[in-house]
Amino acid sequence: MTPRCFLFLLILLVLRPALGQSDLDLRIQKMSLREKVGQLFMVGFPQDHLDPTLTNFIKTQKPGGFILFRRNLKDSKHIRDFTSEIDKIARVHGAIPLLAVDQEGGSVTRVPLFPSLPSALSVGLAAREDLARDLGEESGRLLKWHGFNINLAPVLDLSDPKSESFIGSRSFGSDPILGGKIGRAYAEGLRDAGVIPTGKHFPGLGGTRIDLHVEAAGFQSTMDEFKSRDLKPFELFAKMGPFSALMVSQMSYPFLDPSGMPAPFSRPILQTLLRQEMGFEGLVITDDLQMKGSAVAFPARDAALQSLKAGADIVMITWSMKDQTRAMRRVEEAVTKGEWSLSELEDRLRRVLRHKALLVDQSTPFVPPALAKSPTGLPATKRLEKIDLEILDAKLLPYRRMVDLQDKKVGKVCVLTSEPHFIRSYKDAYRAPMRPLLLTNRSSSPRFISSLKSCPLLIFTVNGKRTARVLQLFEEDLRRKTVIVNFGPAGLIPEDPLWRLRLEIGHPHLHTGHRMAEITKALMAGRRVASSQDPQNKKPQP
């Protein structure tokens, strides 16, 4: 346990009794029913500024949480200004708001940083809890600097990189213990930065291929298999205690709830399993109740009420202000008419307000991240670059150990990639003849493939299905001299022993080109690559 983590837990132990007694109860007593209901909602909206419509909605409906997507965000200054404006008006008309964002890394990165945040798959491949914790802390500090206090990450679902699934590279991998430890370490880093981590999608998606935004699905498994695999990462996460959250999946789990009700509306899942058996003390948040997985059970107007009754603390509706307002009025109506007890509502509210109090009380004075200049203009820190490089090196170490070939020096290396930065980084470190080839839509042509036959060695980066399809056109002679650097899931590339070398990296790290140049030199000189020094140019590169 890090000293900061120990200090954080000590503060929690001191604060928890005070937060659960008279002051909090007195505050709840003074709140109107509308204020109480609003605190249990996390809303999205289409605006990228605080216009009269959004301002009036916050004043009248008093939502307690806001989720921002790429549609709401511009550059770094805009993000900081916008979150500050929302925070100020929400405090005046309610309480400190939860300002949430999906900052998972990889393809799900709402706040662009430099270097880009690696995907969960990439972090999982490194298999280092310390690096996952460091990444969580530094990215959390940058999130907090931008005005966010809750991150809807990490993804704790298991996903086999060799199989196609909806989650894909958003998962730390298929090993329930390793994935759980890496996910929890990342979450602890976020918490150390003063940002609430949110594990998702409880109790697990089971590697489904179905996009639950547009289609409903049930989890196909046995109870024993489920508990030994998919539930494990969530059990580890649940032991973190308060100042944490879990987002509920939209799937149904017949072996947990024979009614077949999707998880957001299932008391056996949210109450019996999560609260009673697992002892989870954090917040329970739904995924967007306008997704298909929820809509098949209840319309948005009723879905919020039914989920709160089942055990959710915060319900999320991200698109329609009309639906959000209707859902809030429906909850008010249910309490007024006795359909849902005020005591249960206040139980949810108490947990929400306790976490919000911790957002204020747990923080020592926030130390902004030490920003560095970046060629892209995006927020950057030297520590983030250092962590990114350490994650890359942790994955390359096994390959460096296995490079011990007896080839004599050959001619010009061909480097094929869709990443211009990879070429620049590679060229800077290689300092020898090379033929850079930027992959385009024309790279699948017979003429292009034929032109590669003159290359004695090919370095080929795979970013997705389009670049992977080019590899399928390689005949045996090309495969034998191709080194694959895979930035995506392993399943993108069919297993084939003919490839010269295959490196599973999972993300186009800033210095991947530099490190690959070192490995190329070893391949050409027929020697083993030992652990090397950091890139000569210490400054962030474009």
Image (spheres, rainbow, N blue to C red):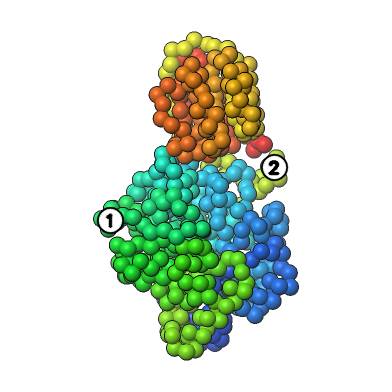
180 to 86, vertically: above or below: above
Question: Distance from label 2 to label 1 (Cα)?
Answer: 49 Å
State the image quarter where residue 404 is shown: top left
Q: Tell me if I can see residue 357 in this picture.
A: no
* Residue at screen point 67% across, 36% down: 542
Q: Tag 2's secondary structure?
A: loop
237 to 54, vertically: above or below: above
Q: What is the crowding at mark 1: few (fewer than 14 residues within 10 Å), some, or many (at least 20)?
A: few
- Name which residue type carries label 2: Thr
Q: Residue 403: x, y in percent?
A: 43, 21
* Residue at screen point 50% across, 62% down: 292
Residue marked by disc 1: 222
Q: Nearer the viewer, residue 332 or 185?
A: 332
Q: Tell me if I can see residue 349 in this picture.
A: yes
- Name which residue type carries label 1: Thr
Residue marked by disc 2: 376
* Residue at screen point 54% across, 62% down: 150
C-beta proximity under 8 Å, tags 2 and 1: no
